[in-house]
Image: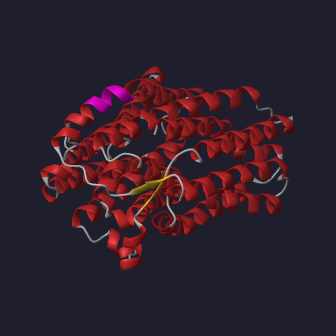
Amino acid sequence: MRLLIAGQGISAIGNGLVVPLTLIYLNQVRGIPLAITGTLFTAAAVMGLVTVPLAGVLLDRVGARPVLIAAIAGQALAAVGLVWAHSALTALPVLLLQGAALAPTFPAFNTLLAGLSSDPEQEQRAMALNFCFVNAALGAGAMVGAAVANVHEVASFQVMFAGNAVLGLVFCALVLLVPNVRPPHDEQRQEKVGYRDVLAPRSLRTVMVVSLVLAFTGYSAFDSGLPAYASVVSQVPVRVIALALAVNTVVIVVAQLFMLRLVRSLRRSRALALIGVIWSASWLLFGLSALPDQSWARTALVLTFAGLFGLGETVLAPTLVPLVNSLADKRVRGRANAMSTAAFSLALMVSPALSTGLISAGLAATWIGLLCVGCLGSALLGMRLGRQLTVEQDSVASPDQRIVEPELQVSRTD
């Protein structure tokens, strides 16, 4: 588990180098019009929605390790392709490959990491540590990228894309050292399963609905709405937006281990409800940032929003994915992770148009209100989930307090 988390962190440094700069590279360096560039990114997101369900099937049939290796290798190949992409026609297949490879990475990684331990407490801790390390690595990569990138020197971007590919291959090599995780072969042959089986348990259906709501009120809204609302409505300088992103990352890195202690003492359903409450409060503060006349007050509210939102992220990381893996039948665990990931992929595709459209139409307050209502709705769903789960399902028991039954085959030879 430590080896897998280390590999993810190494890869995240490379992603931090290029992800924030890819749009700038294609638009300002390669001269592709901004509208066309946006269309290319949308096409990549759509491709991810297509490959995620297929990846879920493969996760349950061949195991998480080969799927994760293929996804990382695809991203590395796409990074190399971006080195030479110089027009919309040459960038399109590269971005389609990137979208097709990026989306399956998350369910494959989550399935593999969760399957390496039968101890829920250890799994929860691993998810929290991974989230902390990935954010720190992304931040480090982004700082290096900001220092190296020069729109007048195409080579400065090409070097970073090549470096991202190399770090991805290092991650591939480390994954090869990790045992594969998949359901037993005899159970696969005895009974055919599909995505319908994922939603058979009522509690897991509720978790999937919560995933969808949190997807639209969480990362996707933050990434697209923060720069749009802060610059247009709150009218804070661009440097404040960059500082807000830095505050968000620092809060995650500093607070993750402390919040993990709190989450471990809570029932999982209540932890989900807590995420909704924290994010609702953060979006309310963000909405209020447009009201003060003093620029320092608007800046303070924007930065407080970013920090409080990051605090909610530290609760989400060790809660949602472990809950999905614990409630899903072992035969369809890969599909369950894929379905949860698909909700976030869909939100990442729709939210930018939704947030910018409402803000540009003068409906910024409506946008904020919808986010607050959605977050509170996820909190209510979390409380409802608590009535659907048994005490054992809703809590993270220590290994000596429960009987551990093998659920997944872990094999170095498969």
Instruction: Give residue 309's quadrant in the image.
Output: top left
Residue name at image x 31 percent, y 32 percent: 260
Residue name at image x 40 percent, y 73 percent: 188
Q: Nearer the viewer, residue 116 or 81?
A: 116
Residue name at image x 83 percent, y 49 percent: 31
Instruction: Give residue 150's quadrant in the image.
Output: top right
1 left or right of 397? right
Q: Main secondary structure of the magenta part?
A: helix
Residue 65, above or below 196? above
56 left or right of 85? left
Q: Is residue 99 visible?
A: yes
* Quadrant of the snapshot with the N terminus: top left
Residue name at image x 56 percent, y 59 percent: 67
Counting from the top left corner in percent of width and height, residue 236 is at 53, 30
Counting from the top left corner in percent of width and height, residue 130 is at 46, 37
Span colored in magenta: 256-261
Q: Nearer the viewer, residue 2 or 341?
A: 2
Total residue callouts: 0
159 left or right of 67? right
Within the magenta stretch, is there residue 260?
Answer: yes
Question: In the rendered view, how is the structure colored?
Answer: secondary structure
Counting from the top left corner in percent of width and height, residue 380 is at 20, 52
Counting from the top left corner in percent of width and height, residue 30 is at 83, 48
Q: Is residue 289 visible?
A: no
